[in-house]
Image: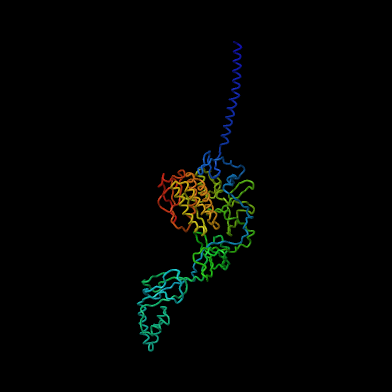
């Protein structure tokens, strides 16, 4: 019995020891691991590999594409308050490109490119008017573009006043021997009404009063405007037609305010047209507008061109190249225009401060003259520094997400999460809640060709209204092909950023046939499309910017339509009429 008790006691002690070893130690380790996990997760942010602007405090799905979020790189230590670091993955996905200042190709290009139009030479324009009161009995000028020659019959006019003057002439002719001064005064009166010596002599020799009198052209040219009709009663001096002599025309170009110091009268300019792409025409600057256009911040620079073969048509688009007035261009610091971000008050660039790591900081610069696709930097950069030249707005969005100074935030701000992340990009680029952006300049060619994009976009929108994922994908591909063909060579950096973002969203919509995913990308596509459309001055149709407040996780989303009626592309039949018109682009 005693031996059994001893065995039981020994077994109990061994069991307790083994239990403590197995479970007590494991519990300690578990506690340590839990504490370690909590400490490691403290401050951990999660992002999307496809959309690095998304930042959330916990794991989950990307609100844009639905992919699993991945841990974001922890904040870099040893950086100044103005500096921030991006991941290599984010750099690759956003196609961030940098250039070393001072070694940029094309800096030695000493030409300035300008865009403009052919206009009527107003100095060679004349108004054909009636020189006496009367009613137009016959009008021989019928339409614009009609060619007329000096001395050609323009109109026949019945004038009671002229009938009375003819009677005076016949009476004075019978008395010219006794009252030569009266006779001479009556003849001069008719001459002031532009009657020729032959007409006056004809009236006198025939001895009859003419009821209808002809009006002849005093100049040769092309009718640019018909200003009267048959049956109109004209007062003395009232115009009949406006005639333009197109033997010379004006080539009018828009020059930026920063370029003015490089232009002077008499300067040579080489002019090209889309109509004759293989020909270059030589001209000289004959006029520089003394008044700056406050809306566009440009000045009109004009050259007068000879047009003997009628090659130039008023309204034709032209481009001009002119030698820069910069005398020491090799020593002047230039950067590509795509590197510059304008806020209206400040000009900004992003500098890569570490050659081996993707660490950036925002830098405010002072700009000088524009030279082609490059802009002079007077202050703020040194030769040899590396700056972002492609993907600038993506870098700016990353700065905003990390609470650093950014384009629209001089002092920095909180890190945004979820929807705020991609909407933050919209705010950084100066837009309001309806997607309207700050003023952007698009080339005349882009403005004209963008009209072809809108019908394809509207078909894409209608496919989403019908909740047809396959047709949506097809129409996205069609819109994408048209948008890719547009010429962005003369478009400013902000405009290019919106176009490139639209292309990225269309590619995503075309690849997916998941309706929810397509509509998520359609949100961002519209933020950019509305911004572009809001800055076009020539549209074939009135566009309505419509907004659904419930779309995009109740944050609201916009789209474009040519109809005032609401047909919601984000919900289709489920909520077809949900939304309202928030802006009209006329």
> Image check: 473 left or right of 325?
left
> Image check: 134 left or right of 117?
left
Residue 143: name its quadrant: bottom left
Using the image as rendered, state which of residue 210 and residue 484 is in the foreground. 484
Q: Is residue 448 above or below residue 171?
A: above
| Quadrant (top left, top right, bottom left, bottom right) of the C terminus | bottom left
Residue at 54% over, 40% down? 69
* Number of numbered discs overlaid on the protein picture: 0
Q: x, y (%) of residue 284?
A: 56, 68
Q: Is residue 192 above or below residue 461?
A: below
The answer to whether residue 182 shows anywhere in this view is: no
Q: x, y (%) of residue 330?
A: 64, 59
Q: Is residue 558 above or below residue 22?
A: below
Using the image as rendered, state which of residue 37 and residue 242 is in the foreground. 242
Q: x, y (%) of residue 362?
A: 58, 49
**Coloring scheme of the render?**
rainbow
Residue 230: name its quadrant: bottom left
């Amino acid at each position: 019995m005693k031996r059994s008790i001893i065995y039981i006691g020994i077994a109990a002690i061994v069991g307790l020891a083994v239990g403590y070893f197995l479970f007590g130690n494991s519990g300690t380790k578990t506690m340590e691991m839990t504490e370690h996990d909590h400490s490691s997760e403290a401050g951990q942010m999660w992002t999307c590999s496809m959309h690095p602007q998304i930042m959330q405090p916990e794991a989950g799905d990307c609100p844009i594409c639905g992919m699993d979020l991945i841990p974001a790189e922890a904040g870099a230590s040893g950086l100044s308050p103005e500096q921030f670091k991006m991941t290599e993955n984010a750099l690759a996905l956003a196609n961030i490109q940098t250039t070393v200042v001072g070694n940029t190709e094309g800096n030695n290009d000493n030409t300035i490119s300008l865009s403009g139009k052919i206009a009527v030479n107003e100095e060679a324009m004349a108004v054909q008017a009636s020189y006496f009161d009367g009613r137009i009995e016959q009008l021989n000028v019928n339409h614009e573009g009609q060619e007329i020659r000096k001395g050609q019959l323009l109109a026949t006019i019945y004038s009671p006043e002229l009938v009375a003057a003819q009677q005076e002439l016949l009476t004075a002719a019978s008395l010219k021997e006794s009252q030569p001064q009266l006779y001479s005064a009556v003849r001069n009166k008719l001459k002031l009404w532009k009657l020729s010596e032959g007409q006056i002599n004809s009236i006198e020799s025939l001895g009859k009063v003419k009821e209808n009198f002809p009006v002849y052209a005093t100049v040769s040219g092309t009718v640019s405007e018909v200003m009267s009709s048959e049956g109109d009663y004209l007062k003395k001096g009232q115009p009949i037609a406006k005639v333009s002599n197109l033997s010379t025309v004006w080539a009018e170009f828009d020059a930026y305010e920063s370029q003015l110091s490089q232009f002077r009268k008499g300067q040579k300019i080489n002019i090209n047209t889309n109509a004759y792409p293989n020909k270059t025409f030589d001209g000289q600057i004959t006029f520089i507008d003394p008044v700056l256009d406050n809306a566009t911040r440009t000045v009109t620079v004009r050259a007068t061109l000879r047009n003997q073969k009628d090659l130039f048509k008023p309204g034709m688009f032209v481009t001009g190249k002119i030698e820069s007035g910069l005398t020491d261009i090799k020593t002047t610091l230039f950067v590509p225009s795509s590197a510059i971000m304008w806020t209206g008050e400040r000009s900004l660039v992003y500098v890569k401060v570490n050659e081996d790591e993707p660490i950036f900081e925002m830098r405010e610069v002072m700009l000088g003259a524009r030279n082609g696709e490059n802009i002079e930097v007077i202050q703020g950069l040194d030769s040899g520094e590396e700056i972002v030249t492609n993907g600038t707005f993506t870098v700016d969005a990353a700065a905003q997400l990390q609470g650093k100074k950014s384009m629209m935030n001089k002092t920095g701000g909180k890190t945004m999460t979820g929807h705020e992340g991609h909407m933050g990009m919209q705010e950084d680029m100066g837009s309001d809640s309806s997607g309207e952006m700050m003023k952007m300049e698009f080339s005349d060619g882009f403005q004209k060709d963008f009209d072809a994009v809108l019908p394809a976009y509207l078909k894409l929108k209608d496919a989403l209204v019908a909740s047809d994922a396959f047709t949506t994908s097809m129409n996205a591909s069609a819109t994408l092909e048209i948008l890719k063909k547009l010429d962005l060579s003369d478009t400013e950096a902000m405009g290019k950023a919106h176009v490139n973002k639209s292309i990225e969203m269309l590619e995503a919509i075309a690849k997916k046939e998941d309706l929810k995913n397509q509509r998520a990308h359609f949100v961002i596509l519209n933020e950019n499309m509305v911004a572009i459309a809001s800055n076009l001055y020539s549209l074939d149709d009135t566009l309505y910017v419509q907004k659904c407040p419930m779309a995009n996780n109740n944050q609201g989303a916009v789209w474009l339509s040519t109809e005032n009626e609401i047909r919601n592309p984000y919900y289709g039949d489920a909520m077809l009429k949900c939304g309202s018109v928030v802006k009209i682009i006329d």
